Image (cartoon, rainbow, N blue to C red):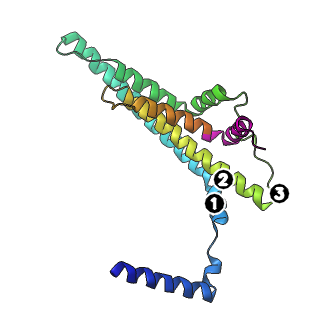
Amino acid sequence: MRNEFFLSALLWVCCLLYSSGVCAAVPNLEAMLTTFATATPNLMRLVTAMAYVIGMFLVIAAIAGMKHFGEMRTMQSQDHSVSGPIIEFLVGAALLYLPSSVQTGLSTFWETTNPYAYVTAASDQYTVFINACYGIVQLIGAIAFIRGLLILKHAGSGRAQHGELTKAVAHLVGGILCINIYNTIQMLQASVGWG
């Protein structure tokens, strides 16, 4: 009962604001995405910096884990695997060298490894909007790629659940496809036969 009253009051307020012309100042989806896309280069730098910090932490933790493994082997007190720290070290190195890791992933799928080759000069509003959407999808792809590496680290630790490795590979491949979204769309169009 209270929710119905709240929804009807909200509807009346929206109608009142719309009829008075106040809602004319509210931006549409295109304006919001275009404005957000202007922040994506800075957000991409933030994501890359976070990857560097996480990578450094993982490398240090892997070295400490290898030291612990070496101490356990000399005492022979329990069976301990070295695969977890090695995978953690490799994932940390991939995060420290994130641009090189992404370039390697891009060159796996395409001959050209420049994901910004599609960007054209903004001549009309539609081109600006499409370039903004591509930039946002690239940011999401970079985050998915980093998440895939972190899931891969967890999958190699020995405490992983069933399907962690496939989830990591899906994030890595999906992240690479999103980072080079223009060529991904071109590939899908050529495969399906659109346009």
Q: Earlier in the sequence, mark 1 or mark 3?
A: 1
Q: Which residues are magenta?
A: 178-195
Does 132 sit left or right of 47 as displayed?
right
Does 180 sit left or right of 153 as displayed?
right
Q: Secondary structure at mark 1?
A: helix
**Residue 99: % across, % down:** 59, 33
Q: CA distance from mark 2 to mark 3?
A: 16 Å
Total residue callouts: 3
Corner quadrant of residue 155: top left
Q: Amino acid at mark 1?
A: Leu
Q: Earlier in the sequence, mark 2 or mark 3?
A: 3
Q: Is residue 148 visible?
A: yes
Circle 2: is it few (<14), some (14-19), or many (20+) Cα within 10 Å? some
Q: Amino acid at mark 3?
A: Ser
Check if residue 191 falls in the magenta segment. yes
Q: CA distance from mark 1 to mark 3?
A: 17 Å
Residue most extreme to the left: 77
Residue most extreme to the front: 193
Q: Earlier in the sequence, mark 2 or mark 1?
A: 1
Q: Nearer the viewer, mark 2 or mark 3?
A: 2
As displayed, is residue 111 above or below residue 1?
A: above
Q: Secondary structure at mark 3?
A: loop
Residue at the image point whose x is 26% and y is 18% from the top: 80
Residue at the image point whose x is 63% and y is 26% from the top: 108
**Residue 78: % across, % down:** 19, 16
Between 27 and 99, the one nearer to me in the picture: 27
Q: Which residue is mark 2?
A: 133
Q: Which residue is mark 3?
A: 123
Disc marking residue 33? 1
Most prominent secondary structure in the magenta stretch?
helix
